Amino acid sequence: MRIRAAALATIVCLIAAGPSVAHQDTVLTLRSNGVLNGLPTQYQPAAIEIGPIKSDPDGRPVPRVVVRLSGVESILKPCVAELFLLPKEQSLRIHGSWYHDFSILPPYVVVDLPSQTIEDEWFSGYTVLFDLRTAKIIELHQVVVTPISKFGTISRRIPAHKALCEGGASSIWEVPSSLLPKVK
């Protein structure tokens, strides 16, 4: 009987401690000059530069977006860069992790691109997950949030890279600018 009571007490302690030891991303800030604050030195320099807006062949506005992580730069293709044009009332949310088990997921930065905020943490829009070491996109999802009366809110994450850019995830970033010839 004592063994059962001890086992039950252990299980209760583990369940109660679960939320307190759960992994949580670190919130990062983006300065007005594009510099990303809050990362350890081994992942710097880091920046997300949203450059001049040009029109694509169909006349849609598209910014030039350069992501720099660990000193490696990637220029996002227009099919992803246009997601960075947010409604006036919305802003980028950036968070990441570099202190988890890398065998599951590399160190990363997530850029949330809300088109509509439903509640404080709930938004519809897109999320882009970048590898902190290579500045490459790991995942790109569309987030669809639906408020449900009496039950709260539900969120669905839909893989979006193929819908946005033909050819899959490997084709949504261009050649890193560090590999391009230097222009004087």
Image (spheres, rainbow, N blue to C red):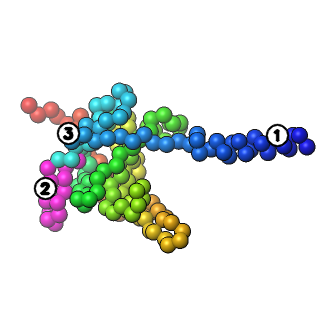
Residue 6 image offset from top left, x and y in percent: 82, 40
> Residue pushed farthest top?
41
Q: Earlier in the sequence, mark 3 or mark 1?
A: 1
Point out the stretch of residues depicted in magenta: 52-65
Q: What residue is at 20 percent from the left and 39 percent from the top?
A: 33
Question: In the figure, 87 relative to 5: above or below?
Answer: below
Assess whether residue 141 is covered by the magenta stretch.
no
Q: What residue is at 45 percent from the left and 35 percent from the top?
A: 98
| Residue that mark 3 sits on | 33
| Residue that mark 2 sits on | 54
Question: SS of the residue at dot 3?
Answer: loop
| Residue that mark 1 sits on | 6
* Amino acid type, callout 2: Lys
Residue 5 image offset from top left, x and y in percent: 84, 43
Q: Earlier in the sequence, mark 2 or mark 1?
A: 1
* Amino acid type, callout 1: Ala
Q: What residue is at 17 percent from the left and 63 percent from the top?
A: 60
**Mark 2, residues whose alpha carbon is within 10 Å: few (<14), some, or many (≥20)?**
few
Q: What residue is at 48 percent from the left and 65 percent from the top?
A: 153
Question: SS of the residue at dot 1?
Answer: helix
Q: Nearer the viewer, mark 2 or mark 1?
A: 1
Nearest the viewer among 41 and 55 is 41
Relative to 178, 15 lies left or right? right
**Mark 1, residues whose alpha carbon is within 10 Å: few (<14), some, or many (≥20)?**
few
